[in-house]
Amino acid sequence: MLIGAHVSPAGGLPKAIERGLERDCDSIQIFSQSPRAWKPTNHTDEAVAAFREAREASRIKAVLIHAVYLLNCASDDPELAEKSKIGLINALTVGDRIGADGVVLHPGSAKQGDPVAAIQRAGKVIAEALAETDSCQLHLENTAGAGGTLGRSFAELSDLIEASGSDARLGVCIDSCHLYASGYDVSTLEGLDATLAECDSEIGLDRLRSIHVNDSTTELGSNRDRHAAPGEGLIGAEGLRVFLSEPRFEGLPTILEGPGTGGNEAELIDVQTIRTLREEGIKARG
């Protein structure tokens, strides 16, 4: 498992590698632009080359980009759908340039509309974005299930992949907090086994490409996306030991998004906590 954290590239892309190393990361996740703005950041060729050089010289084995929050590939507003496609193309293009292992995307929301139609709209936008980019993977993230968000179940993620053309570049990022909030009890061995059996049946574990490991402040099935510092939420330390010691997650980039201890961004102590919980979970499994 390539344990790491979401880090900031403020000050230049190579700073993200520096911050990842400060946090003892084997993988990192970044925003390639402001997560709440449409305007893309102009990453110069020099900055991209410096990032690649810094990564090559480091212990960082995987890099993910999280697409900006404004994107709604499922929108029935043609202008917003087009802006979302352009934003997704930009993220995938930056991913290609820096050698990212994938772009993580919230698939979108039907709002108050028909989710079946929304999935088809999202699939069209995603397919067009993939067709206009090179090789960077796209990881569709499961959601906590609030409102009309798409991807609250593995069946829905499967429909999104099919609507997007089932491209080999399409994978899935599963978030422990989102799973728990949408009713998947990943805090027990039995619940996690059932969750992964459903994932395998609906999608195939070969499409499981990345992990977000976040605790939850809200209860199982709450449909509310509220992260807690690791071990301080309702999944809890014991639940995270179960989740992190899952052998089928071996080799996957596993990102702590935060918050960390004290409510701030994830820091070294939080990544160390994740590593300790994983080691304890492996020992408990025998």
Image (spheres, grey):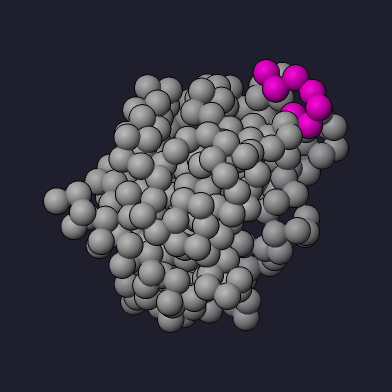
The answer to whether residue 136 shows anywhere in this view is: no
Q: Position of residue 186 (x, y in %)?
A: 41, 41
What secondary structure characterizes most of the magenta part? loop
The answer to whether residue 267 shows anywhere in this view is: yes
Q: Residue furthest left?
A: 286
Q: Position of residue 166 (x, y in %)?
A: 48, 25
Q: Does 280 lie within the magenta span?
A: no
Q: Position of residue 31 (x, y in %)?
A: 61, 62
Residue at image position (72%, 45%) is 71
Q: Does 112 lie within the magenta span?
A: yes
User: From the viewer's perspective, is residue 97 above or below residue 250?
Assistant: below
Residue at image position (24%, 46%) is 247
What stretch of residues is rendered in magenta? 109-116
Apparent side of residue 23 relative to residue 70 in the rendered image (left or right): left
User: From the viewer's perspective, is residue 156 above or below residue 284?
Assistant: above
Residue at image position (40%, 59%) is 237
Apparent side of residue 99 relative to residue 70 in the rendered image (left or right): left
- Name the foreground residue: 22 vs 237: 237
Residue at image position (43%, 49%) is 211
- Name the foreground residue: 70 vs 50: 70
